């Protein structure tokens, strides 16, 4: 029973979704089957889009020097960094959920909270492709005016987020976790699951199995190791562990 409670606690959203689907099936079967069909389409889209996004995120972590990311998107990048963040989001492709692995990779490498927020927000609402579609349906005057109003708001929101949420707190929450690994799944939850191969294993699954066999420790993950090197906070937490 305790094990079941722990599984439910660790997967609250999944169990909540299953519960809602179950209720919908009895209340309105028609809505249920439409929902299942939409979920199927969404999952197929994710399978098509996410692999290349994970590859790009892994390449950012492994190939691009931390100094480059810090200089371009870090706290010292100034207003130029904000504009570059807007451009990255604006020229991006794919749905907003594809932005999160890329944003995480940039954040781990030294991007500021403000620029991370700006990249995500720009990706969501001011993509170039979106401008073309919006202009076609609502007119270029409407689209241009919305973009002219939206971009400054996104930049201001980035500044505000940086005042409210510190980089150190985010990194602590992401990485400073003392976990007792009882299974491969426990290890996988703490890995980036990008399958970059930088650790010497073919996939994060293989690496997690190696951790359980005692061949490696979780911080032999190249992405986690780089993240700890780029943050004094994580260096301290790593020493405590």
Image (cartoon, rainbow, N blue to C red):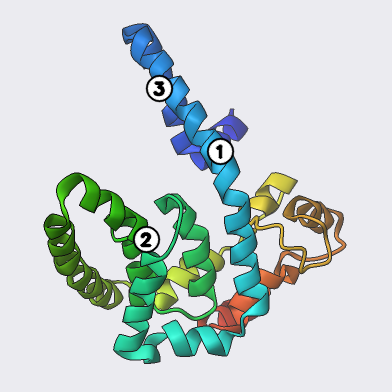
Does residue 192 appear in this view? no
Does residue 227 appear in this view? yes
Mark earlier in primary sequence (2, 3): 3
Q: Is mark 1 on a helix, strand or loop?
A: helix
Q: What element carries label 3?
A: helix
**Which residue lies under the disc numbered 3?**
35
Q: Position of residue 117 (x, y in %)?
A: 34, 68
Q: Residue at x 59, y 76 (%)?
A: 227
Depth check: give the residue in front, 169 or 123. 123
**Which residue lies under the disc numbered 1?**
6
Q: Which of marks 2 and 3 is in front?
A: 2
Q: Where is residue 78 in the image (x, y as percent from the top left)?
A: 32, 90
Between the residue at mark 1 and the residue at mark 3, the CA separation in whole angstroms equals 28 Å
In this picture, residue 98 sits left or right of residue 217: left
Task: Look at the picture and state if 126 lies above or below 162.
Answer: above
Q: Is mark 2 on a helix, strand or loop?
A: helix
Which image quadrant for residue 132? bottom left
Q: Residue at x 30, y 76 (%)?
A: 162
**Which residue lies under the disc numbered 2?**
123
Q: Position of residue 46 (x, y in %)?
A: 54, 42
Between the residue at mark 2 and the residue at mark 3, the CA separation in whole angstroms equals 26 Å
Q: Residue at x 75, y 50 (%)?
A: 205
Quarter that holds the C terminus = bottom right
Mark earlier in primary sequence (1, 3): 1
Q: Residues within 10 Å of mark 3 (few under 14, many from 20)?
A: some
Depth check: give the residue in front, 14 or 134. 134
């Amino acid at each position: 029973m305790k094990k079941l409670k722990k599984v439910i606690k660790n997967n609250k959203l999944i169990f909540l979704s299953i519960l809602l689907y179950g209720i919908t099936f009895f209340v309105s079967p028609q809505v249920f089957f439409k929902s299942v069909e939409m979920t199927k389409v969404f999952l197929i889209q994710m399978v098509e889009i996410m692999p290349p996004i994970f590859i790009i995120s892994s390449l950012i972590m492994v190939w691009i020097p931390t100094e480059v990311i810090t200089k371009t998107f870090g706290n010292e990048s100034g207003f130029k960094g904000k504009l570059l963040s807007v451009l990255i989001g604006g020229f991006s492709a794919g749905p907003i959920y594809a932005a999160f692995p890329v944003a995480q990779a940039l954040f781990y490498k030294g991007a500021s909270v403000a620029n991370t927020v700006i990249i995500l927000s720009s990706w969501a609402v001011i993509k170039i492709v979106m401008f073309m579609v919006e202009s076609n349906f609502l007119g270029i005057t409407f689209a241009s005016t919305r973009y002219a109003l939206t971009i400054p708001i996104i930049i201001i929101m980035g500044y505000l987020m940086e005042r409210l949420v510190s980089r150190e707190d985010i990194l602590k929450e992401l990485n400073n976790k003392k976990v007792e690994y009882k299974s491969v799944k426990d290890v996988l939850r703490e890995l980036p699951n990008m399958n970059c191969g930088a650790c010497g294993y073919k996939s994060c699954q293989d690496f997690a199995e190696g951790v359980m066999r005692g061949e490696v420790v979780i911080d032999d993950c190249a992405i986690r190791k780089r993240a700890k090197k780029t943050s004094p906070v994580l260096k301290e937490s790593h020493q405590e562990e």
